């Protein structure tokens, strides 16, 4: 098995309404298994745009993207969706939990969608992750009753349910106060250290970034340090 989980080769992207100024400009890097990467850079430098490309959601770019050695560029949408469900766990700034379902069901949903295990197995796994994240007691609650920090922990459990190759986060602590940011960070760190989970997290918090195992820095659509 290759140790490279994610590879960007000369990725560029231009939003044409912006006078053809590239938002991503010849981005190349690899992420190895087990790395905890922080993608840093000022607001507007292209971090979210890059994350959408890396996650296979945005297919309108130049260059080549590989996930676990498989070329994603040019693959049909059905294969990309399969790769996303199976290999990528997402944590966003806003949690996108469904208030009509319990916490437990929210965490189970990507597993039910992937349809590789029985409901019972998925439930057992969901409870395991809720337990690891210290929120098993919330499993029967509806998300709208939880605090911001608790919601984000549920979102992380949901991202873990399919045992993803990589967790991608877009400013996952951007909407949290200092205490909860630290809590969420400590969870990522734990996942990295105890479970060797590969993480690729966009942040503009330098304190957060300094505590990861690797920092990639962007400016005006380019990588200036990695
Ligand atoms: N859909 C879009 N159409 C046109 N311009 C966009 C679009 N999305 C983002 N941009 C522009 O691309 C640049 C990078 O945005 P973004 O990737 O969101 O930056 P970051 O996440 O680093 O704050 C910004 O100048 C933004 O205005
Ligand atoms: Mg952004």
Image (tube, rainbow, N blue to C red):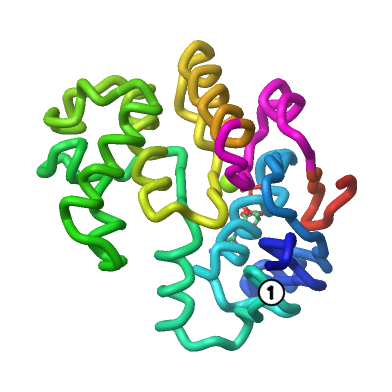
Q: Is residue 48 above or below residue 20?
A: above
Quarter location, residue 147: top left
Question: Tag 1: Cα neighbours inside 10 Å, few (<14), some, or many (≥20)?
Answer: some
- Residue reaching furthest top? 179
**Which residue, given by chain and number where applicable, does mark 1 sit on?**
69
**Residue 95 drawn at (x, y percent):** 35, 40
Say which residue appears at 64% left-offset and 36% top-offset.
203
| 214 falls in the magenta region | yes
In percent of width and height, residue 209 lies at: 72, 30
> Helix, strand, or loop for circle 1?
loop
**Viewer-nearest residue: 112 or 116:** 116
Q: Which residues are magenta?
A: 194-215
| 190 relative to 51, above or below | above
Q: Is residue 105 left or right of residue 174?
A: left
Residue 153 in which image quadrant: top left
| Residue found 76% across the figure and 26% down from its top | 210
Relative to 60, is 25 on the left or the right?
A: right
Left/right placement of residue 173 relative to residue 33 reads left
The front one of 53 and 122 is 122
Residue 99 visible in the picture: yes
The magenta stretch spans residue 208? yes
Q: Does 33 appear above or below 176? A: below
């Amino acid at each position: 098995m290759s140790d490279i989980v994610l590879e960007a080769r000369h990725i560029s992207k231009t939003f044409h309404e912006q006078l053809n100024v590239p938002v991503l400009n010849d981005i190349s890097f690899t992420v190895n298994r087990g790395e905890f990467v922080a993608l840093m850079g000022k607001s507007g430098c292209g971090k979210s745009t890059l994350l959408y490309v890396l996650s296979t959601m945005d297919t309108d770019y130049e260059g080549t993207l590989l996930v676990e050695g498989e070329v994603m560029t040019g693959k049909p949408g059905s294969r990309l969706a399969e790769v996303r469900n199976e290999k990528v766990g997402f944590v966003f700034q806003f949690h996108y939990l469904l208030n009509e379902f319990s916490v437990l069901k929210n965490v189970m949903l990507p597993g039910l969608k992937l349809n590789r295990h029985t409901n019972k197995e998925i439930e057992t796994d969901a409870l395991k992750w809720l337990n690891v994240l210290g929120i098993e007691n919330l499993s029967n609650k509806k998300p709208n009753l939880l605090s911001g920090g608790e919601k984000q922990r549920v979102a992380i459990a949901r991202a873990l349910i399919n045992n993803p190759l990589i967790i991608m986060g877009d400013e996952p602590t951007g909407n949290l106060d200092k205490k909860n940011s630290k809590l969420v960070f400590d969870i990522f760190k734990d996942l990295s250290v105890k479970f060797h989970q590969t993480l690729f997290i966009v942040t503009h918090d330098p304190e957060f970034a300094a505590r990861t195992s690797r920092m990639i820095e962007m400016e005006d659509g380019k990588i200036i340090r990695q």
